[in-house]
Image (cartoon, rainbow, N blue to C red):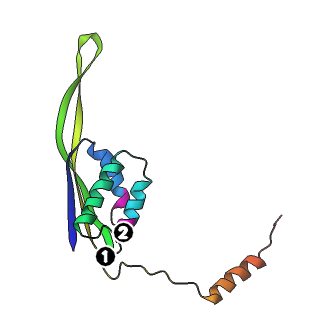
Amino acid sequence: MEATAQSKFARYAPRKVNQVLQLIRNKPAAKAMEILAFTNKVSAILVGKTLKSAIANAGRLKNMDGLKVKSCWIGNGPVLKRMRPGPMGRGMPYKRKMCHLTVVVADMEPGELKIKKKKSAKSIVKEQGSAAAAPANPQ
């Protein structure tokens, strides 16, 4: 099942939001939320809210297991044209950009769920044995 969330007319430049989106593409939803919590960008707040909304639209806000960020993209919004004072009484134009953000979350396929294998006792003994065989202070 797929769920979508959109955030329109956000006052962030599309290039800057896309930098954050690259961090979470094709990641599990829980891992993506964790990445966004520690990302030091202002647009990470917007992406986090939109991702949380998409997860809620999927009906899995309490338990995000089995959900992944299937796709996320950014679109250009309208541009506000403004003027800044320049030298010799001139006006220097600049643009305040907006963007439209879309996040799609979907259920993971059975092959995508990775199950970590526990190390066997033999492999642990081999690792400890090879560490003991190596010299402690080679000079």
| Residue 25 lies in the magenta-colored region | yes
Image coordinates for residue 75, horizontal then vertical, percent: 20, 50
Of helix, strand and loop, which one carries label 1? loop
> Does residue 25 lie above or below 7 as drawn?
below
> Does residue 58 lie above or below 127 as drawn?
above
Residue density around tag 1, few if under 14, some if 14–19, many if 20 or more, within 10 Å: some
Measure the alpha-carbon separation of dots 2 and 1.
8 Å
Amino acid on which the number 1 mark rests in the picture: Met
| Residue 108 badge | 1
Residue nearest the viewer, comparing 57 with 32: 57
- Considering the image in quadrants, where does the N terminus appear? bottom left
Query: Which residue range is magenta in the image?
Result: 23-30
Residue nearest the viewer, comparing 44 with 96: 44
Of helix, strand and loop, which one carries label 2? loop
Image coordinates for residue 114, horizontal then vertical, percent: 42, 79
Query: Given the current orientation, which residue lies at the most extreme top position?
Result: 88
Amino acid on which the number 2 mark rests in the picture: Pro
Image coordinates for residue 35, horizontal then vertical, percent: 42, 58
- Considering the image in quadrants, where does the C terminus appear? bottom right
Task: Give the total number of marks visible in the rendering.
Answer: 2
> Does residue 102 lie above or below 17 as drawn?
below
Q: Can residue 39 be seen in this view?
A: yes
Q: Name the residue under label 2.
A: 28
Q: Which residue is drawn at 18% across and 44% down?
A: 77
Image check: 136 left or right of 114?
A: right
